[in-house]
């Protein structure tokens, strides 16, 4: 999964929790909300990833069993495993915390986080056991299936991934979406169902590609490519192009693979795509062009012009983006925390 | 928080032709102004329309905050980075140096 998605999932889950209904008494609830906001701000200002882990762990000591427990544990896993490279430490941290949780819903969330942390081939057996164990908590939610499928990819358990795509596909149907959002208007249900279905299809395609069914995978990717939501750069908002490109690589079709992988490497900073492109670059450009220079050259070839706009600053002065020509401009979209 | 970390980049490269524009996405003007003042940020801050009319967000098709774009001297979008965590300013600085 894209690194930024993991971070924004944490931020979003924290934000979503702000509006959740209060079960605890009002002042405790207020303190918890204030503390989770403070934690979110402190993470943004943390000097390094180790400090971020400490902040999260401190929060878990004070609040071991709340609706924030799973997202906070997920953030612990992200920093330890993805940023600090301590995969065993990440798993140990979640395992150590689980006995401190009593509430069944919170516990289920933490067990899903643990399953998600088993995303390496050496944890294949642990992941299978953990997926089994989750049945004790009732059927997983759609988002849980995404976590489990991604873990199965990491563990290279393609059969498990294919098995999980079946119930995930049911949760992606309009009926499945309605189950999660009973009050959503039809149009919203249809949109969400389509987005989920495309994602599950892409996952099934990638699992099939890895079990030798690359032709079937490519036809799934082609169909998904017509249905997927795209961003400013024409890139899908999910891993479609990464899986598609890597499947084409497996088939030995390097030129077409590059066509899919380069945009994801250049415009989505997708690390898997960058690595795959690096591999192909070494083969296709043996004349020693530096990889960073190559990426820069490819950016220049495919960069899109910024559309012009006018906007006022806080003193009311109007600025025209045309005045930026000739300058290098950093544009940051932000909001005050 | 990304904005205070951009200030040193601005100070270092503005004379070489770097400008920085920060666009506040949630239209929380009071908090935004307070934040800018408290942190002593000196680059350009722009306002955009409300959610539906957030025209600049539409120009860039922004889906998450924060998102950082680098536009080169010919007006081409050359780099996009979603999110901001420790060490990202080094990555952004490397890209700026390539463009300057």
Image (spheres, coloured by chain):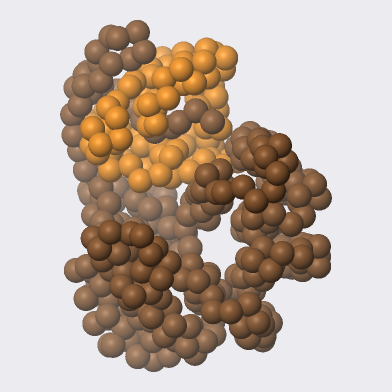
Residue beneath the point at 51% across and 53% down: A9
Chain letter, colour brown in render? A
| Rendering quarter of residue B67 | top left
Residue A313 horizontal/vertical position (percent) = 33, 15
Where the C terminus of chain A falls, by quadrant? top right
Residue beneath the point at 22% across and 75% down: A222
Residue A58 horizontal/vertical position (percent) = 78, 46
Is B36 located above or below residue A14 in the figure?
Answer: above
Q: Nearer the viewer, residue B81 or A75?
A: A75
Q: Nearer the viewer, residue A195 or A276?
A: A195
Residue B3 in the figure: left or right of residue A126: left
Is A190 located above or below residue A295 in the figure?
Answer: below
Residue A251 in the figure: left or right of residue B67: left
Residue A295 in the figure: left or right of residue A14: left
Q: Is residue A249 visible?
A: no
Is A64 located above or below residue B25 in the figure?
Answer: below
Residue B88 horizontal/vertical position (percent) = 53, 40
Q: Is residue A218 visible?
A: yes
Residue beneath the point at 48% across and 43% down: B83
Is A173 located above or below residue A2 in the figure?
Answer: below
| Rendering quarter of residue A260 | bottom left
| Rendering quarter of residue A246 | bottom left
Residue A323 in the figure: left or right of residue A21: left
Chain letter, colour orange in render? B
Total marks shown come to 0
Q: Nearer the viewer, residue B65 or A82?
A: B65
Q: Nearer the viewer, residue A53 or A37?
A: A37
Residue beneath the point at 72% across and 41% down: A28
Residue A144 horizontal/vertical position (percent) = 53, 70
């Amino acid at each position: 999964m894209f690194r930024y998605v993991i971070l924004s999932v944490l931020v979003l889950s924290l934000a979503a929790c702000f509006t959740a209904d209060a079960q605890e008494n009002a002042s405790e609830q207020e303190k918890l909300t204030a503390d989770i906001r403070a934690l979110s701000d402190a993470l943004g200002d943390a000097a390094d990833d180790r400090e971020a882990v400490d902040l999260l762990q401190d929060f878990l000591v004070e609040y071991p069993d709340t609706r924030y427990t799973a997202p906070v544990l997920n953030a612990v896993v992200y920093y330890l495993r993805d940023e600090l490279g301590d995969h065993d430490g990440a798993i140990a941290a979640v395992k150590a915390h689980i006995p401190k949780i009593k509430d069944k819903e919170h516990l289920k969330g933490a067990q899903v986080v643990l399953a998600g942390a088993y995303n390496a081939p050496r944890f294949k057996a642990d992941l299978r056991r953990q997926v089994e164990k989750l049945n004790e908590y009732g059927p997983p939610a759609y988002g849980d299936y995404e976590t489990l499928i991604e873990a199965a990819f990491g563990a290279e358990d393609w059969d498990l991934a294919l098995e999980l795509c079946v119930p995930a596909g049911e949760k992606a149907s309009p009926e499945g979406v309605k189950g999660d959002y009973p009050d959503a208007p039809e149009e919203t249900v249809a949109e969400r169902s389509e987005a989920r279905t495309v994602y599950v299809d892409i996952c099934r395609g990638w699992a099939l590609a890895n079990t030798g069914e690359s032709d079937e995978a490519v036809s799934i990717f082609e169909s998904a490519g017509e249905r997927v939501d795209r961003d400013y750069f024409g890139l899908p908002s999910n891993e479609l192009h990464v899986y598609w490109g890597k499947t084409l690589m497996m088939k030995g079709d390097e030129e077409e693979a590059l066509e899919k992988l380069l945009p994801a490497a250049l415009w989505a900073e997708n690390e898997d795509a960058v690595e795959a492109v690096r591999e192909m670059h070494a083969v296709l450009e043996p004349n020693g062009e530096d990889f960073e220079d190559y990426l820069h050259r490819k950016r220049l070839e495919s960069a899109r012009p910024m559309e012009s706009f006018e906007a006022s600053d806080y003193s009311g002065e109007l600025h025209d983006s045309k005045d930026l020509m000739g300058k290098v401009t950093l544009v940051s979209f932000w909001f005050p925390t | 928080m990304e904005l205070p970390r951009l200030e040193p980049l601005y100070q270092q490269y503005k004379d070489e032709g770097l400008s920085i524009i920060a666009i506040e996405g949630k239209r929380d003007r009071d908090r935004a102004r307070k934040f800018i003042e408290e942190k002593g940020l000196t680059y350009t801050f722009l306002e955009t329309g409300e959610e539906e009319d957030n025209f600049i967000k539409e120009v860039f098709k922004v889906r998450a905050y924060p998102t950082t774009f680098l536009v080169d001297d010919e007006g081409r979008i050359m780099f996009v980075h979603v999110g901001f965590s420790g060490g990202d300013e080094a990555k952004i600085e490397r890209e700026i140096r390539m463009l300057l």
